[in-house]
Image (cartoon, helix red, strand yellow):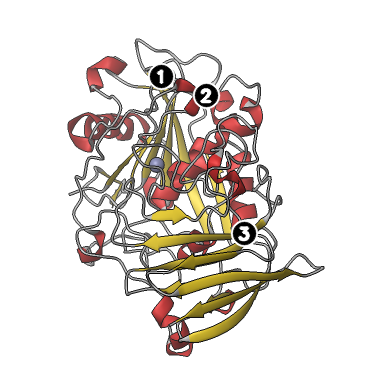
Amino acid sequence: MPQTRHRIRTPRRAGAYIGLTVLALGITATASTGISSRSHSAAGPVATSAESALAPCRITGAMGVQMSEGLPTPPGYSRSTGEVRALNLMIDFPDAKGEGTALDRMAEFFPQTSDWFRTSSYGRLTYRAEAPIRTWLRMPMPFAAYGIGRGSAYEPGYRQLVEHIVKAADAEVDFSRYDLINVLVTPNAGPSALDTVLSVTFSGNAEAPMADGVPLANTSFVYSRQDDGSGTYRETGFRVLPHENGHVFGLPDLYTSDGGGSVGHWDIMSEDWGANNDLLGWHKWKLGWLDSSQISCASKSGVSDHTLTPLAVEGGTKLAFVPLSDTAGYAVEVRTQAGNDEAVCKPGVLIYKVDSQVDTGRGPVAVSDSAVGSGGCTRRPNVHGELSDAPFRPGETFTDEQNGISVSVVGELRNGSFQVRITRP
Ligand SMILES: [Zn+2]
């Protein structure tokens, strides 16, 4: 069965969130060791004996979870380090002919998306966006005939669409040369993203149609324009694509049917509307963008001290992790207004729980708010308010009384690093 991810978020300004149930077509990816694919090796770090001290912090995937926060990311997804080649195909329909040129549509996402990945990965992911076909690829059927709506499954509409794309492009495209595919749909097909977000990714899908000997296993579809009317579309409209490609690399959705209240604007898998934002440190470790030497594992009982450098700045220790079990723990990192994190209004130590037994779209990550009920510090549109001031400042302590864990922010150093003291039983 294919693994599917559906964007279920509606923008805040559209009002009430629609509580769509995530369609769980896939079975657990942890069982999918039999997937054979060319270069679709697993993303993220691989444990070695020298890294055994980190073993308790490598929470693993859980059976029955479609897309999990566990390490390592299972096979079948696109690799997330080194050179990643993205095939971009701009498609239109007989009843929704492309307005403007196909390359204009691509320019809504590039070079911003490539730059975003370079910045977030500290240069470890080189994203090569290619468009061997420079014109609109016309589909043989009207858009409506594919039956594509919000939350549509891969079968049968998307399978038919992908088959038609392959048929139209195969003479000019060698699909085996690419790690992932972006289908950039003409914006006039389907509803406005303000009404319904159709953009979706089907990832780790070994049963996708084949082309040039490979399954089109990791494919993102982007519809409409994520234009919130604030006048920032040119700066922020591209961000749907790094979100969708996050699924191609195996990352789950962090928003839930209730919206962005679990993680707020602290990860692009939570909120991809509005001002630019980065990924959580946990995700960067999962993607192989942080070395094991940059992770500080607080697995031993007692008190431990950790000095963390800001996540947006290259080098240094980025993440302290407090394992609670084989499948859950607390992550601790420093977030500042730098790099991709332009909307940070209260820099400090962000603390969040990661649970690999919670599936995509159900809240696998939950940020701890240092100022519950404050309303937050941001006034940016489409940035979750309440959690915007979630980071802990020097003198503040997070406690989990049930598990006997505390994380105290001891101080901030002149170089921007934060000192953190972790106590555990
Ligand atoms: Zn998503």
Q: Which mark is residue 102?
A: 2
Residue in the picture at 33% in, 58% down: 68
- Can you name the residue that lies furthest to the bottom here? 50
For the point 39% across and 39% down, the residue is 220
Looking at this view, is 367 or 254 the one in front? 367
| Of the two numbered discs 1 and 2 in the rendering, the one whose residue sits closer to the viewer | 1
Question: According to the image, label 1 marks what residue?
Answer: 195
Left or right placement of residue 343 versus residue 81 in this view: right
Q: Earlier in the sequence, mark 3 or mark 2?
A: 2
Classed neighbour count for the residue bearing mark 1: other residues with Cα under 10 Å, few (<14), some (14–19), many (≥20): few
Instruction: Find residue 61 and report its horizontal and vertical position in percent.
Output: 30, 66
Q: CA distance from mark 3 to mark 2?
A: 46 Å
Q: Are marks 1 and 2 in contact (CB under 8 Å)?
A: no
Which residue is disc 3 drawn over? 392
Residue 309 in percent (x, y) is at 68, 68
Query: What is the distance, in whole Å, between disc 3 and disc 1 at their CAs?
Result: 36 Å
